[in-house]
Amino acid sequence: MKKKNRTLTGFLLLVFAGAIAVPFIDGDKAANLLVDPLFWMVVLVVFFLILASAAIHSALDSIKYYVLRKEGRLEEATEAEVAAATGEDFFSRLWRKMQDAKPIERESEIDLDHNYDGIRELDNNLPPWWLWGFYLSIAFAVVYLIRYHVVQSAPLQEGEYQAQMAAAEVQKAEYLKNAANLVDENNVVMLTDEALISDGSKIFNANCAVCHAADGGGGVGPNLTDPYWIHGGDIKAIFSTIKYGVPAKGMIPWKDQLNPSQMQKVASYIMTLKGTTPADPKDAEGELYTPVIEEEISPADSSSASDPVEESVAEDTPTEETEQQLSAS
């Protein structure tokens, strides 16, 4: 059985993993990645780590082989250990040159005669792979210093952050510009910004005042200032009425003439007309609309909540305002 080359296997696994990952990377990002020196430095470091791991395993096998041979128990050595001690393939020769270390049988030539509890000190040279890595790190530092601090041909981290934030603001503005037209009767909310309400007022005067009067008091269309509504008085109902219209009563669907953002603005403006006093109000039509106020009750306050039976009785008890409305009708 041939010795398994851990270095070659590890490197092939690395290449295979990269080949799988490439299709999932955006084309522009992949192109930028291939010209990024930091990326290749990481690849080089990973390759050396794989190479070092293989060398450590090979060295351990070799040491065990020589120990067993010295103790006369060579038959206990595995095939991998014998191959590590006696065989030498391309990667083994490459690692030996990159390591520049004396073999075990010649360690006496570099023995410094320093013995610490049985541990001998050897005068090995620094591994060439480590030296070249050190030199590359110095070269990288020089290039980095010149590019980012001397020539300043590339932005520092703070500059990159500011550029990315500026680009994000542009993307955000573009998104909000388009998102305004994603509003529908299910997610519409009332606008409170005065500028947007003012826009809604202009749209109302240009399109709705002819039927509902400029002050919302009603004409051909119903009064928009009283609490009575034919199709619902909340923002979603008003938006839906504007969007789909009421063809049976002569109100056209405005979805073909106004975009969702404009319909939201005019619906929000109509909400501000509630409770105002028009010059010539039309008689109330529809049903009394009472806004539903949803309040969250925390668990700590749940014990102090009023009894449901008492609330039901209180809701069924006519108020003074209701009695006045009934007597007026």
Image (cartoon, rainbow, N blue to C red):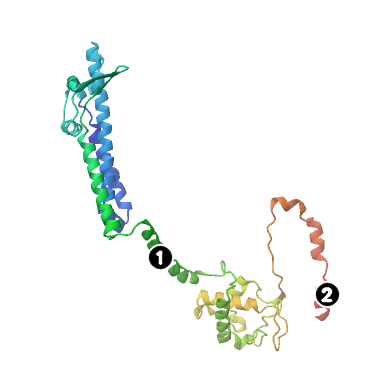
SS at mark 2 in the image: helix
Which residue is at 69% across, 65% downward? 293
Dot 1 amino acid type: Ala
Residue 24 position within the rendered picture, expressed as x and y whole percent measured from the top left: 33, 52
Which residue is at 21% across, 33% downward? 127
Q: Is residue 114 visible?
A: yes
Label placed on residue 323: 2
| Quarter where residue 5 is shown | top left
Dot 2 amino acid type: Glu
Residue closest to the eye, 102 or 76? 102
Judged left or right of residue 235, residue 319 is right
Judged left or right of residue 199, residue 307 is right
Mark in the foreground, 2 or 1 = 1
**Mark 1, residues whose alpha carbon is within 10 Å: few (<14), some, or many (≥20)?**
few
Confirm or deny contact between disc 2 and disc 1 (CB under 8 A).
Answer: no
Residue 296 position within the rendered picture, expressed as x and y whole percent measured from the top left: 68, 58
Give the vertical position of 67 relative to 176 (above or below): above
Residue 19 position within the rendered picture, expressed as x and y whole percent measured from the top left: 27, 47
| Quarter where residue 247 is shown | bottom right
**Mark 2, residues whose alpha carbon is within 10 Å: few (<14), some, or many (≥20)?**
few
Residue closest to the eye, 257 or 92? 92
- Determine the CA span between mark 2 and mark 1: 60 Å
**Pointer 1: what residue?**
166
